[in-house]
Amino acid sequence: MAGAPRRVGAETSATRALIIEAAKQLIREEGYAATSTRRIAARAGLKPSLVHYYFPTTDDLLVEVSRQGAEDSDRMIEEALASDDPLRALWEFFVDTSRTAMALEFMAMANHREAVRRHMAEHSEAMRVRQGEILRHILGDRIHRLEGFSPEGLSLVLAGIGRAIVMEEGLGVKTGHAEARKIVETWLAKLAPDQS
Amino acid sequence: MAGAPRRVGAETSATRALIIEAAKQLIREEGYAATSTRRIAARAGLKPSLVHYYFPTTDDLLVEVSRQGAEDSDRMIEEALASDDPLRALWEFFVDTSRTAMALEFMAMANHREAVRRHMAEHSEAMRVRQGEILRHILGDRIHRLEGFSPEGLSLVLAGIGRAIVMEEGLGVKTGHAEARKIVETWLAKLAPDQS
Amino acid sequence: MAGAPRRVGAETSATRALIIEAAKQLIREEGYAATSTRRIAARAGLKPSLVHYYFPTTDDLLVEVSRQGAEDSDRMIEEALASDDPLRALWEFFVDTSRTAMALEFMAMANHREAVRRHMAEHSEAMRVRQGEILRHILGDRIHRLEGFSPEGLSLVLAGIGRAIVMEEGLGVKTGHAEARKIVETWLAKLAPDQS
Amino acid sequence: MAGAPRRVGAETSATRALIIEAAKQLIREEGYAATSTRRIAARAGLKPSLVHYYFPTTDDLLVEVSRQGAEDSDRMIEEALASDDPLRALWEFFVDTSRTAMALEFMAMANHREAVRRHMAEHSEAMRVRQGEILRHILGDRIHRLEGFSPEGLSLVLAGIGRAIVMEEGLGVKTGHAEARKIVETWLAKLAPDQS
DNA sequence: AATGAATGAGATTTCATTCAT
DNA sequence: CATGAATGAAATCTCATTCAT
């Protein structure tokens, strides 16, 4: 019992997990604005009041979902940074459609849910700092092959370009995507360690 | 389609303009999720049914608002591109907080409103193409001072970085912003015409 | 249009009056705690949302009902004080079961509804002051036939005794009622003008 | 029915006492309408189902709370009537804000809870009878110093005036209170035994 | 050109209570 | 003795939309 988190429903509850999964699905498929406790319950095949049994307020649920999304991101980033070609893996993480689309939904959500905003801010900041450290470690002096670049700057630049591509793809926009990817590829090539 | 706009209420109606202005304000101040026809009416000091008189459906209204927002953007871009230092002006346009925040709201809206999505897609595409043309014209060969860059690629890259900065500022995130701005500044310097 | 109150639904609306009447009935018959907008709507044969159309919040409705109840009281008091035997009429007003029971419900309601509390406080104060003035005018020096009495004191004493009798009758308590009424009768006799 | 109390949980259970105490607090602080088993549980730091374990229905709990409140009142009255100046002590009991406010909550509750109503009725009746007896014993013939008064009548009159004062103070009404208190003081003086 | 009335659907919560363990 | 899970009903309120005038 020691240390066991004291929230309604054990963290291991299957029902609880079911609700969170349904919420994730809805956010992914229809965007966060379509995410009401009613619809989440319907999607999970549960009664609305059961959702409120596990998550007293809608905020509680959405914060938990964004917390889990953040954990997923963290895990993916650690994998990326531990891979053979960490820089390329990081870039691929940034243009991963489904994950980035979800992250963008949480950004939009943050505008209207203070609790979500707080969590997203903390996590984004921490992620940027962490990426900066790792990039500094991985790239060392090679970062100066790109004039004006720094690890943290690179992290933000890649994230921004990735998000823009994903966002516009979702919209149906195409122009400039291949060209932007080519710019990034040029950077990746320059920063690659095997370059003599 | 034959020229004459087929909507209720003259396009010049003061009431109509009042409604649109109220909608813009609400979107800017509280985000699009807080934007219902009832609240727009209240903000404009009008009855909800009058809003529906001018805009039969909520979609009609929001599409019109996004259309006007797009027009504003177009105008700002043309001004930027016609200025003394068009490239820097374009970059400043991309990091203009209030406009970009609004654009991001429309992106979020596009996820749930097919009509808005369609309009945003068309406009974004057109804007990218237009920026590409102008940048090609303005920069000429100077674009090759930056390895791998192309006018359309540059347009997307600047837009993406600008949006990321604005989005994160809204969240309260700081790390990497100065560094990213420095990267962009380096590019702007390199691309400047007065460089011998 | 000048001066016309600017609330939803003309004050003369039949539907509006229907809702208020239903609320009054429910409060009288089942007590204020049974008074939800749903039940009021059902009693009036209307949809709950229509109730909210006329009274955006439950408070709005209950304040209006208490306002009308206060007006009824005012009217009854003026009639009482204008009658042949104003003092006795006032006492009979205080032991009028249905009106006092209703007033007690509003008192209870005031504990949980700040808006109602405010209105009840204002009205009770005004009523006490008004009764004091009239009693002073009606009784003149005769008030001193009862040692220690004053018009305002008498007003409160009669109100308190009346309320206690009505409250206890509602409960089913009997003991002491006849005796208390006799005490009051003695006062009324002493204060009567025709007493030589 | 044969002596042994037939309720779940020993009457001496500490948990049981905790629940009752939490209920009392809530009623006192927020009024009975704010008193749900869930909130009582939360206030006591217990799970809702535990409250229902001790008190199968809400009625069971509220009746018990009102029973204990009645016992408290009984004790206070016995103390008052056994004091040096029993009449004044009784009057002070009647204008004791916290106790009277609580009693008024129970009165309101009685309107909606038959079980509470029954208990309140029995207790009020018994209290009035008991007060009558004691007053008769204490005052003896002195009761006739006040024309028209009788022990039971006096009991109700004092209770009614006291309740009115407390009720109106809760509302924020002031006018007439000092004057009513003066009337009562005059009676107390007249009825005092040391008056020659 | 404008508005009051009305409505059905849905959102978020709270509630008392039951039941199996 | 105690609790986690579940539920159906209800409460308050908001919403987009329609319609008749």
Image (cartoon, coloured by chain):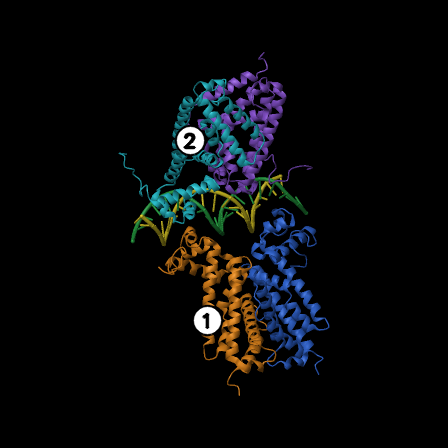
Chain colours: A orange, B blue, C purple, D cyan, E green, F yellow
Q: Position of residue A178 (x, y in %)?
A: 56, 75
Q: Position of residue F17 (x, y in %)?
A: 56, 49
* Front-most of residues C78 and B52: C78
- Examine the rendered structure and indicate whether residue D37 appears above or below residue D106: below
* Front-most of residues A43 and D168: D168
Q: Residues within 10 Å of mark 1 (few under 14, many from 20)?
A: some
Give the numbered dot on residue D54: none
Q: Residues within 10 Å of mark 2 (few under 14, many from 20)?
A: many
Q: Position of residue C191 (x, y in %)?
A: 57, 17
* Front-most of residues D91 and B83: D91
- Examine the rendered structure and indicate whether residue E14 appears above or below residue A17: above
Query: In which image quadrant can residue A2 be found?
Result: bottom left
Mark 1 and mark 2 residues within 8 Å of each other at the beta carbon: no
- Examine the rendered structure and indicate whether residue C40 appears above or below residue D127: below
Give the numbered dot on residue A76: 1
Q: Can residue A105 be seen from the camera position used here?
A: no
Left/right placement of residue D81 relative to residue C46 reads left
- Under mark 1, the amino acid is Met
- Under mark 2, the amino acid is Ile
Q: Can residue B27 be seen from the camera position used here?
A: yes
User: Can you identify the residue that label 2 sits on?
Assistant: D77
Q: Chain of mark 2?
A: D
Tell which residue pokes out farthest to the bottom in this image: A196
Helix, strand or loop at mark 1: helix
Q: What residue is drawn where x is 64% and y is 60%?
A: B67
In the rendered image, which quarter contains the N terminus of chain D?
top left
* Front-most of residues C50 and D61: D61
